[in-house]
Amino acid sequence: MKMLLTHCLCLITLLSGLNQLVNSRHLPLDNCSINVHTQELRRYFSVVRSTVVSGDSEIEVKLLDKSLPKSIQDGQMCCFLRLVLRFYIERVFNNYASSQPQNQSCTSSLANAFVTIRKDIHKCHCTCTEETQRTIDSLHAEFIKLEISLAAQKAMGELDTVLDWMDELGQSTRK
């Protein structure tokens, strides 16, 4: 019964903004573009945000810098975003565990959404330079310095940075 209620709460949270879901964000990625429902992702994240942020005991460590995409070379945004999504799918979501069923459900929904976005990006056939790969490798290096569950908690708490990157990328086409 409790699990059913938490799934319903997550669903209600999402359906409350259904009209926003229709409006996907167009993300230009070098030689192609994809559509991402950033509002939907933010709704999922909003359900888990306070728990992951309050549970982050590694406050002196920062995995993601909000300005990181600005340092990415021209023609590498597709690769960069694909590798960031891969990091979250393979490292973060696989190692993040919440004792709250509501958070588990919404985290699973976020992971599934990231898998879908990554599949869409894969169709773009982007190639990566060594510099972009080194940028992502440094993210992995910071992640593995922490105990795995703490690292996953930290990365979950910084997920809003990834969502901000997607929003900024989508807004760049409107200027």
Image (cartoon, rainbow, N blue to C red):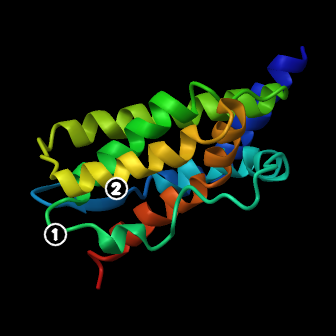
How packed mark 2 is, by other alpha carbons closer than 10 Å (few <14, some 14-19, many 20 or more), is some
Q: Nearer the viewer, residue 14 or 59?
A: 59
Location of residue 6 (image quadrant): top right
Identify the residue at image location x=52%, y=59%. 64
Q: Residue at x 83, y 45 (%)?
A: 55
The secondary structure type at the circle numbered 2 is helix
Q: Is residue 15 visible?
A: no
Tag 2: amino acid: Thr
In the picture as drawn, the residue positioned furthest to the right comes out as 2
Determine if residue 153 is in view: yes
Q: Position of residue 109 (x, y in %)?
A: 58, 32
Quadrant for the N terminus, please: top right
Residue type, numbered disc 1: Asp
Position of residue 111 relative to residue 48, above or below, is above
Q: Are marks 2 and 1 in contact (CB under 8 Å)?
A: no
User: Does dot 1 land on a helix, a strand or a loop?
Assistant: loop
Which quadrant holds the C terminus? Answer: bottom left
Residue displayed at 25% across by 59% down? 77
Q: CA distance from mark 2 to mark 1?
A: 14 Å
Q: Residues within 10 Å of mark 1 (few under 14, many from 20)?
A: few
Residue 136: x, y in percent? 36, 49
Q: Residue furthest bottom?
A: 175
User: Which residue is the site of mark 2?
Assistant: 135
Residue wearing tag 1: 74
- Indicate the position of residue 135 as horizontal and vertical percent values: 34, 55
In this picture, is 9 found above or below 126? above
**For residue 105, side relative to residue 162 (left or right):** right
Task: Say above or below: 154 vs 93.
Answer: below
Q: Earlier in the sequence, mark 2 or mark 1?
A: 1
